[in-house]
Amino acid sequence: MSTSTDNNASITQESGPSAAVQDIQKKIVVRTADGEVFNLKEEVAMEIDIIKTFFQEDSISYETVMPLPNVEGWEMVKVIEYCTKHVELKHKVDGYKERKAFQALFVQNLSTKSLLALTNTANYLEVKYLLDFLCQAVSEQIKNKDVDYVRELFGVENDFNDEEYEQVKAEAPWAHENLNNDLH
Amino acid sequence: MAKSSYQTYRRRTRSYRNWLELPDDVTASILSRLGAIEILTRAQKVCMPWRKICKDRLMWRTIDMRNDGFLRDYDFDLDKMCRHGVDRSSGGLVDINVEHFGTDELLKYITNSSTGIRRLRLVCCYGITDEGLIEVASKLPLLEHLEISFSFASAQSLEVIGRSCPLLKSLKLNKYGYRCPYHECDDDALAIASTMHDLHHLQLCGNKLTKDGLQKILDCCPNLESLDLRKCFNINFGVVSKRRCSKRIKSLRLPDDSTDDYEFDRANRRELYAQTHCDPDYGDFLLFGRSVFGRDW
C-alpha cells in the first residue's frame, strides 16, 4: 500500500509542477503612491512600458513589488482598465465600434482636472496609445471654445503683459476679430 | 492695462498650478490636435507657456488647416495664416492639409521653403490650377501621400507628379460621382498607370474611368493593397472580375458600396452635391452654389 502510494506520489510529483506552472498566470505587482497594491496580469503589465523595462532587468525578479511613486491608486485602476481592453481588442478582427464605445465611457465621468492628471500618468507610465487617446480627449474639450473659457476650464491665468500683448496683436493680422476681447 | 511686476509674478506662479505638471511635449501633442487655425487664433493667446509651445517649430511639422469652408465669410485670411505656419516650421514642414482656400502662389510659397514634404492634401482648392501643380511637382521629391479632392488636377499634372515623386505610395483623387455619367474617361487612370508604379493605396471615388482604365492600373501597379472605386459608375464589375480583383487587393471598395465611412459623403460632410442640371463636365467643381470660375453666384 505504502509502495503504491509512494509510486503515485512520485508520479504526481513528476507531472504535477509543470502542469501547475502552466496554469498559474504570471502576475506583476506594483504599489502606487498612496500605498495601494495592484496585481496585474503579465500581458497587461507588459503594455505599460515603464513596467516592462523594469522587469526586463536581469537582476529584477517577478516577485519584486514595483513602486510607482508618481501614480495614484485611482489612476492605476483607469490605466489597467484601458490596457486590459486594448489587449482584449487586439485579438478581435472588427473591434472598431466596440473600442469607440469603450473610449466614450472611459472619459465620460472624468473631470478636466482628472483627465489632465491621467494624461500625465499615461505619459509617465509610457503607454503611448493611452496617451494619444487622452491628448485627443483633452483637445476635444478645448476645441471651438473661446480663450476665456479655456483659461477657466484649466485654471490658467492670462499672464500676458502689455508688451507681449502688442506683439501678439502685431503678429496676427489675419483675423479681423477684436483681439482685445480675447486677451483681456 | 499695465500690471505691476509683482502682480505679474504672482499671476505667473498661480497660473502654473495645473499645466506645469504636463511636460511641454504632451501639451504640444494636445494643442497640435486643434488644427492650425485654432492654434493661431485661440490656443496661443491663452497664456505665455502655451504661446511659447505654439511658436516652437516642431509644432509646425504638420499644418492642418482643416475648416468647413465658411471661414472666408468671416474675414479670416487663411492664406496669411498658412504662410505664417510655414514660416514657423522653419523648413521642417512634412505634412500639410489645405482645405477650401489656396492659390498657385501659396503652393509655391509652401514648396519653396519646405523640401521634405511627405504628405500633401488639397481639398476644394479652386485657386490651385494644373499649371500650379505642375510647377511645384519637382519640389516634392519625398512625397509619399497625395490627396487632391474636388480640386483641379488633370491627367497631365498627374503624370508630372507621378514622374517627379518616385516615393508616392498613396493617392486620393476624389470627385463627384454621377449616377449616369455623360461620358467615360480613362485619362486619369492612364496617367496613374504610366507613372505611379509603386502605389499601395488608391482612392478614386467619383472617377469616370472604365474597366479598361482599371485594368491598366492593376497591370502597372503591382503593389496595390487598397483600392477605393466608390461612385465610379462607368465600371461594371462582373462576378468573375470582382473575385479576381478582391483576391489581389486586400481592401477593395466597389462603385456601389456604402459611403458611410467616406469622408465626403453627403451625410458626413457639409457640402452639397452639384445640382444635376449643371453641365456634368463642370459639375464636379460646383460647391455651395459657387462656381469655380466665378467664385460666388
Image (cartoon, grey):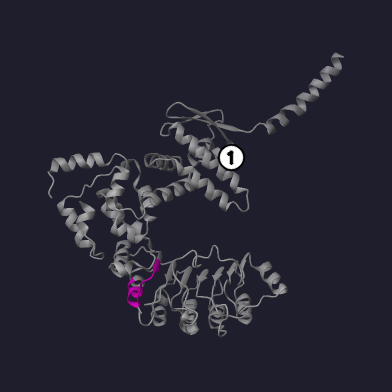
Residue B152 quadrant: bottom left
**Which of A156/B183 is in front?**
B183
Q: Position of residue A27 (x, y in %)?
A: 58, 32
Amino acid type of disc 1? Glu
Q: Position of residue A182 (x, y in %)?
A: 24, 54
Q: Is residue B185 above or below residue A22?
A: below
Whether residue A48 sits left or right of residue B20 in the image: it is: right
Q: Is residue B66 within the magenta segment?
A: no
For numbered disc 1, what is the local secondary structure?
A: helix
Give the residue displayed 50% in from the left and 42% down from the top. Answer: A49
Whether residue B240 sits left or right of residue B38 in the image: it is: right
Residue B129 quadrant: bottom left
Q: Is residue B178 visible?
A: yes
Q: Which residue, given by chain and number where applicable, does mark 1 sit on?
A: A43
Q: Is residue A22 above or below residue B156?
A: above
Give the residue displayed 46% in from the left and 43% down from the top. Answer: A108
**Which of B258/B212 is in front?**
B258
